[in-house]
Amino acid sequence: ETAEMPGFYPEDEYDLAGFSVGIVEKDRIIDGRGVREGDRLIALPSSGVHSNGFSLIRKVFDLDRISKEEAEEPLALLGGRSLGESLLLPTRIYVKPLLSLMERVELKGLSHITGGGFYENIPRSIPDGLGARIRKRDVRVLPIFRLIEERGEIPERDMYNTFNMGLGMVIAVDKSDVSKTLEALKSLGESAYEIGYIEKGTKGIELI
């Protein structure tokens, strides 16, 4: 696959990357068709910005001109981490915990929060006629996103439409399975938590 990154690659140049393709049995496909009104949404934390929104990040922090000293200076807002360290934290991969979780709980829908943030990714795992309601107060926003929002004077909706805001994966489960899901994920070393629910309405997402 290819990618263009304004401000990073010169004009007419691009990134070429490899990827893997897997196979899944039809009866194990998680495609969101089983999502129903009343289902709950469980979040798996991200490690940071992962690999999305870096064109905007480069502009916000003027990374073409920032000095090495500035990039490496510990910042209280980032819990003592430097800007460079915070931006370069490795992306979390959720394959192993999700495969283990699938053996214990029925996963109705999965949303990987990548480019497009909440608004583009979560609706993909929801059938027509249903919408996701996310409680903003419950989203554990990471400090790096607070800094990006503040420095760039970026509207809240644009932040949630660009970045993962601290959530790498969102799982839809039956409301009766919430406790079982959280306990299973805790046993797998995940700090998962509930962030919202599914209700009837226009397909999409609403932050409440």
Image (cartoon, rainbow, N blue to C red):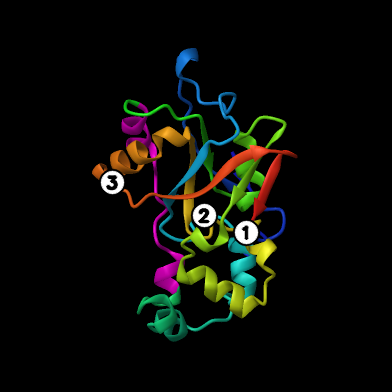
Q: Residue at x 50, y 40 (%)?
A: 40
The percent coordinates of residue 99 (x first, y second) are: 35, 31
Query: Considering only order in the chain, which callout, 3 or 1, is on the residue closer to the N terminus?
Result: 1
Please state if 184 lies on the left or on the right of 9 as rendered.
left
Residue linked to disc 3: 186
Q: Residue at x 64, y 66 (%)?
A: 56
Disc 2: CA contacts within 10 A as few (<14), some (14-19) or many (>=20):
some
The percent coordinates of residue 112 (x first, y second) are: 52, 43
Query: Considering only order in the chain, which callout, 2 or 3, is on the residue closer to the N terminus?
Result: 2
Disc 1: CA contacts within 10 A as few (<14), some (14-19) or many (>=20):
some
The three-letter amino acid code for the residue at tag 2 is: Ser
Work out whether residue 10 or residue 129 is closer to the camera in this orientation and state it.
129
Q: Is residue 67 visible?
A: yes
Q: Which mark is residue 160?
A: 1
Residue linked to disc 2: 51
| Extreme residue toward the left, this view | 187
- Seen in the picture, residue 44 relative to 18 is either above or below; the reply is below
Q: Which residues are magenta?
A: 84-102
Look at the image and say whether residue 85 sits in the magenta stretch. Answer: yes
